[in-house]
Each structure stands twice: as structure tokens, then as C-alpha cells.
Amino acid sequence: MSLSPSEALSEGRRGSSPVAHNAVAIEDTFWQPRLQTLHERTLFHIYRQLEQYGHFDDYYRKWKPGTGRTPYVFWESDISKWLEAASYSLAVHPDPELEALVDKAIAFLASIQQPDGYLNIWFTVVEPEKRWSNLRDWHELYCAGHLIEGAVAHFQATGKRTLLDMVCRYADYIDTVFGREEGKRRGYCGHEEIELALIKLYRATGEARYLNLARYFVEERGQQPHYFDSEARARGEDPADFWARSYEYNQSHVPVREQYEVVGHAVRAVYLYSALADLAKELGDESWLHVCERFWQHLSSKRIYITGGIGPSEDNEGFTADYDLPNDTAYAETCAAIGLALWSHRMLQLDTDRRYADAFERALYNGVLSGIALDGESFFYENPLESRGDHHRQPWFKCACCPPNISRLLASLGQYVYGVNETEIMVHLYVQSTSTIAVRGQQITLRQETAYPWDGTIRLSIEAEQSAEFGLNLRIPGWCNKASLEVNGAEFPLEENLSKGYVRIVRNWQTGDSVVLNLEMPIQRMQAHPDIRDDNGCVALQRGPLIYCLERADNAEPLHRIRIPEAGELQ
């Protein structure tokens, strides 16, 4: 008997959906101060920078070549990511001042939208005659994707439809332009993003054509005759003059199903892989999951830093060769670590496997948080693992993709803590919080108490309207070599109830039930693969999910002279 695609996708896997971020009240001493800074300072700082750089005013209209700071064609995406972050914030921290700025930004974008639905600042104000003329380089559909994500977040946070209706008109117009039907362009974007955004729009509206358009953009990528070649010739250019020299740069060198290695620009790659995971889930298509899994295996075994950073090269902001992971010249863009986290979370929804949650956690605590200062007002674009003291956070960048990207991830942190399906709750991240989760037809209140990541003790307590049988799944991180578990004070057999790194507790739960998980957190010496030449003779120090950084301010000895004993306990 053959299985339907959806049945095949679920066989041997336990999928889940995220619990909405506004259903998770984060209360811990690690995250809550950072999130408060984000709400009170970072979002307003970013808005001020956008204003000062001219994103919101008529700077585009006044600008002429040679007159002042040159705007980028993709500046608009920074507005959209800020809108998304601000919307997540408003969902949990209502703020009239912030909401007024959001409404002002939306009104500005509405003033740009054209009668046919098109909505792009640059190609409306500066070069309207060049609309859709260079998908390879000019980010039009990428900008549309971030605008869609911002609109969905805004609608879900506020219930207001203004921005959502705007992007639906835009997406409807895009659907008339691109596709395989006669008279349409057989194109796709050089920077992936529109694909995953359209799937979000489909989920928010139920409109199937958005899912179908996302599928088209993924499946058309890399097909012959190559669209970017045809497009370049139409502009009077020789495709051979493409600065990146290869379409591996934007993952369009061959059709996606025929790709076997992670290549090219790192952010583009993981945004594409995020869309593949979404397609696998929405279509019940096992084949897309297999494509994701082979990319995952290649990346996680040969092309990732211990911090969760990806993309070692500044030249292409991306990947080079297997085990080419230098420390002092590591690019490891903050947006790439964010993209890895987003992809990991989507893979985790397809299968409750700690590999994906571990990767999310590693990227979050190390590759992402390094990108923002504790004051919330300065940022790293790239994150080298070794510095001579000349690498410093900046308040802004001309290409400022990272600050609003960090903001939207952190502002929505609650949605990454738990997963849920009809019969089970999955605890992916350990964060002190109170959450309301619907399972087995009733509302369960789940409380976490923990000092994680500084301490490995996690206490969970349950309140239920009435007793209910469901599975509670707790992640045992890959870095943890020894763990113990108690349910209502009695030892629970961990090993025999472990599946893909999650311990599964199935019982009839009722108010007052408690679970205590203890994860041992010794300091560990982490050694790299021997083929990573830059790490020969080196170790990294890890405790729990954190990779530690040695800084000159804390050490009397110059860092390059520090030696660590090969054995013995570290404190």
C-alpha cells in the first residue's frame, strides 16, 4: 500500500507547530532584561537611524548621482524588518508611542504603492523604468518578501488589515507577472526571501495561490535556459561578466533538487532552505524534506563554526570549501546565524529531533547575541572568532540588514520555546516563562523555572482545567553528557523514554504535577575536526549552550600566549 505525501512525511517523525510568542510570557533574568532593552531602546534607536539615513522621507526623490550618500535599492527591507520586530513587540508590550511610529511607517509605504499593486520605493521613485529588469542583483522580490513578513506580523499583533491588504494586492500583482504561463516572466529573485514570505501569507490568509507562487519560485530556480542569462542579455550585458562568476552565489547554478552542497551567499542559502522546509510541511512532500536533510548534513558536518556562525568569506558573504573555517577572518554574518536559526526551527517543526533545537540554541546564544550590545544600540555585521582588538560594534551600517533582523528574532523569541501537536507538547528551549498551550482540547498552563543558561536545573509545573493525557517532551541537549529527571518527586527512567534527544513523558496530567530536569553543565574542552587547519592546537571552552570568549580585559597574559592544560577539571 502506498502512502499519501502527508502520511509519508509524518511516518517515523513527530511534527509540531510553534506556540504563539504572545502566549509565552518570558520572565527569566537572562532574557527578560535583553527583551526589555529591545522594547525600550533598540526599536526606537533603529527607527531614528532609518529616519536619519533618509529611509522614510523624500531622500530618494531628492537624490541624484554624486549628491550625498547613495541609497541602496534594498533599503526598504530594513523598514519592513523593523515593522515586523515592532509588531512582535506590540503584541506583548503595548506602547502607544511605538504603535504611532508603526502607523506612520505604514502610511509612508501606502503612499508609494502603485495602482497595479506594485510596492517598491526605489523602482517607483528613483528608477521606475527598470522595474523587474534585474532580478539577479536588485532585490525587488527580496524586499517584497520582507514587506510581506512585516505585514503578517503586524496583522497578527494588532488585528489591523491596512498593511496586510497592501501586501495582498502586491502579491496578487506579482502572481500576474511571474510563472510558467504564457506571457509571464520565468524569473525568480537573486536573493531568496519571497518564497518563505509567500508561505507565511498563505498561512495567514488561506489563499492557495500564494503557496503555489512560492512553489513556482523554488522549482523554477536554476532551470535552463537560465533566466539570469536571458535577463542580462536583455540589459545589453554579457552573462559571463557576472561579478560572482558563478550562479552558485545565489543557489541557482542547477535546479534546487539537483543541489547537494551548501554553497554561495550564506543568508540566501538558509532563507532558501527555510522555504524548502515550509514547502515540505505545507505540501506533505517528503522529497523536499530529503533535500533539506542533505543540505543539513553537509552544513552541520563541514561548513559551520562552533558558534553557529556560517559563511567564512567576506568575498561572497558565504561559503567556500569544506572545513575552510578561519577564525580571524571569519565573516559569519549576524543575518546568517539568524537564518540558520529560522531554518533550524522549521526543521524542528517537521521532526522533534534535538539536532535542530541544538543548532537553534547554539546560533541564538552565540552567533546571534554576539551581534548586539547589551545597551541594544550597537551591532556587529560580521562576527570573527578571533580579533586583534580592532573589531567593534557600530550604531548603524549603510547596509543595515542585521540590526532589524536581530530585533525581529528576539522580539518573537517566545514562539521558539515550545512546539505542540494534537497530543504532545515539546519543550525546545529552557527559558523561565509562563505559557498557555492548547492540547487534547483544553488549555494547559505550563510554568518553567530556571536560571538557564547559567544553571542546568529546570522545574516545570502544570495547571490543567481537568486531568488530561498527553505527552510532555523535554530536550536533552547534545552538549549534556549526564541528565536526571523527576516527575512528582519520583525518578523517571530517562534513557528508555528518549527519542531523538527528547525524553517523552506520557501520563494523565493534572494541576499540581511537576517535573524537574537536571542537566549537568561542566566546562568542556571542544576540539575541532582535524581538517580545520586554523584550529590545530586550539580548543574552545563550552559550558552548557555557551561558547566562551577570552578577552584581553580579563587576562593579564596576552591572549595568544594563554595555554590550557590538556586534562583536569576547569572552573
Image (cartoon, helix red, strand yellow):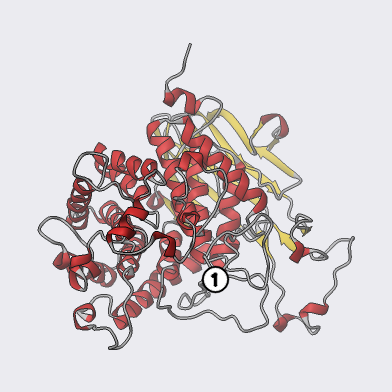
The residue shown at (77%, 79%) is: 559
Quarter of the image for residue 94 reads bottom left
Q: Is residue 105 left or right of residue 409?
A: left
The residue shown at (66%, 54%) is: 322
Q: Position of residue 488 (x, y in %)?
A: 63, 37
Q: Is residue 491 left or right of residue 88?
A: right
Quarter of the image for residue 383 reads bottom right
Total residue callouts:
1
The residue shown at (31%, 68%) is: 79
Which residue position holds label 1? 382
**SS of the residue under disc 1:** loop
How many C-alpha atoms fall within 10 Å of the one at disc 1: few (<14), some, or many (≥20)? many
Q: Residue furthest bottom?
A: 67
Q: Residue 442 versus residue 344: which sits nearer the camera? A: 344
Q: Residue furthest top?
A: 1
Q: Residue 175 versus residue 414: which sits nearer the camera? A: 175
Quarter in which the C terminus is drawn: bottom right
Q: Is residue 106 left or right of residue 236?
A: left
Q: Is residue 148 above or below residue 475?
A: below
Q: Position of residue 391 (x, y in %)?
A: 59, 80
Q: Is residue 18 visible?
A: no
Q: Position of residue 89 (x, y in %)?
A: 36, 62
Tag 1: amino acid: Glu
Q: Position of residue 458 (x, y in %)?
A: 62, 49
Q: Residue 351 versus residue 89: which sits nearer the camera? A: 351
